[in-house]
Structures are given as C-alpha cells and as structure tokens.
Image (cartoon, rainbow, N blue to C red):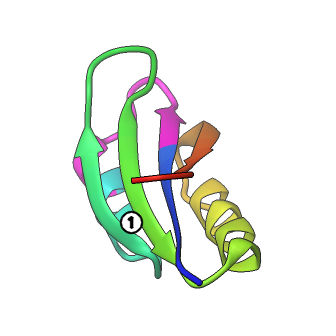
Amino acid sequence: MTVRAYQLVDTAPGSEVAVLISALQGIAGTKTVDAVTGPHDIICTVEVGELSDLARYQTNVHDVSGVTRTMTCVVLRG
C-alpha cells in the first residue's frame, strides 16, 4: 500500500529557505518541496509505503534545523 500526504511546514524566522528545501528534499519519501505563501512556509509532497513510514518521515522533518511546526494531510482519495 502506498501512502501519499502533504506535509505543511512552518519555519523559524530568518531561516534560509534554500537550505531547508535542500534538507527536506534529502528525506526519503519526499517527492516535491515548494516554498509557498500563506499560513505555512513550505509544502512537501510525500509518498511512503505505509503509515509507520509516514511517522518516521515526520520525525525526520522535525529533526531539520529551522523547522518549528508541521501539519500532515494524508491523501484519502486522489
């Protein structure tokens, strides 16, 4: 089973967006990383094998310096 999700990422003020994007792109499961306007700073498109992999993915995102908060939206139907 493949699990797809959107990881909405908030970053610390003054964070280098290019550095964050590069770090997020390096996490297994990341398909795309986009800096955006609005209530969040970055949106990652994620694809992993199962929900436990998504939990690991979230932990890896939180380990990136400059990430302050995330919200995960799992795709139910696409």
Q: Furthest residue to the top?
A: 38
Residue 21 drawn at (x, y percent): 30, 55
Helix, strand or loop for disc 1: helix
- 6 left or right, relative to 37: right
- 21 left or right, relative to 67: left
> Which residue is label 1 attached to?
23
Residue 1 drawn at (x, y percent): 59, 84
Residue 68 drawn at (x, y percent): 62, 36
Residue 44 drawn at (x, y percent): 39, 52
Tally the numbered discs.
1
Tell me the crowding category of disc 1: few under 14, some 14 to 19, or many 20 or more residues within 10 angstroms, Cα based: some
User: Which residue is at 51% across, 48% downward?
Assistant: 7
Q: Nearer the viewer, residue 53 or 19?
A: 53
The amino acid on which the numbered mark 1 sits, given as a three-letter code, is Ala
User: Which residue is at 48% across, 52% downward?
Assistant: 77
Q: Is residue 2 magenta?
A: no
Vertical placement of 3 versus 18: above or below? Answer: below
User: Which residue is at 37% across, 76% downward?
Assistant: 26
Q: Is residue 13 magenta?
A: yes
Q: Which residues are magenta?
A: 8-19
User: Which residue is at 27% across, 61% downward?
Assistant: 32
Residue 36, quarter of picture: top left
Vertical placement of 17 versus 50: above or below? Answer: above
Residue 69, quarter of picture: top right
